[in-house]
Amino acid sequence: MLCLVWGFQQIAIKAVATDIAPVLQLAIRFGIAGSVFGALSIRREGSALLTDGTLLPGCVVGIFFGVEFLLVAEALRFTTAAHSVVFLYTAPVFAALGLVFVPEERIKTAQWSGIIVAFIGIAVAFLGHAEGKQRLALLGDALALLSGLCWGLGAVILRRSALANASPLKTSFYQLLIAGVILACFAYFNDEAAARFTPIAMISLIFQTVVVAFMSYLTWFWLLTKYLASRLMLLSLMTPIFGVVFGHTLLGDPINRHFALGTSLVLGGIALVNGVEFIGRLRHWANRR
């Protein structure tokens, strides 16, 4: 369900980009959600909120989170929603690489082949914008790929810091409020603060704020405190499937052969990584039987 929601969020942003700039949409949704989470966190923990060792890692993760979505917003100005969601969700690859020296998170030797296949898929997908007339789209893809890097690194920091034991509410507060401030400042100084609050734009903002920022992020941060980050990030690769389908059917995003092949390789590489572990679990279960 999280992957379904996240696969649609880029489409919701892109659909009303002419009414409200993507960066301003994200600033509004994160600012509202972060303020509410902050109020709830203060009510729950009081002065202990900022004195339990989570402030510094919270700020660092919040900066990564803000930069991640700043890159997403700018990417959507140049490339399609389908492309942006695929490159954003290369984050599991970067998270797996970042956690390689953590014993309980380390991936197996056989799983490295899946990582290699995924990176080949990224390269192939970029070939679809090799022509000169598509250089702006190539820039958009590159920005979306960098956003994936920021997400992956943010997940590593979250997992390996005091935030790993913090409540999802507090983690959401740090990330969303700091991201909202970063994005709002960028929108103001980059002349992207003008908005037309049309009915469709309001529906999009309500979806982004309530469903994405409130419900899905709380669930995601809770999962990160309970399960291995590398496994969760890998499973999140289902999101690009939904993103490509929604982008193509609802916005008419083109899917050329390079992009289709590259996406297949990225998803296939992640499936290979997960498949090795899944087969191992099946064997373990069979032996116990």
Image: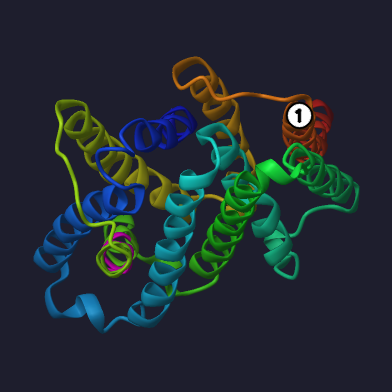
Residue drawn at (36%, 30%), measured in percent from left and top?
A: 15
Vertical relation: 169 (above or below) 153: above
User: Which region shows up in magenta?
Assistant: 176-182
Q: Which residue is mark 1?
A: 264
* Residue 138 colored in magenta in the image: no
Residue drawn at (16%, 40%), measured in percent from left and top?
A: 196
* Residue 177 colored in magenta in the image: yes
Res 255 seen here = yes
Instruction: Please state which amino acid type lies under the numbered disc 1.
Output: Ser
Measured as percent of width and height from the top left, residue 201 is found at: 22, 33
Give the quadrant of the C terminus: top right
Residue drawn at (44%, 18%), measured in percent from left and top?
A: 250
Categorize mark 1 by other alpha carbons within 10 Å: few (<14), some (14-19), many (20+): some
Report whether 169 appears left or right of 221: left
Vertical relation: 223 (above or below) 81: below
Give the quadrant of the N terminus: top left
Closest to the observer: 161 or 19? 19
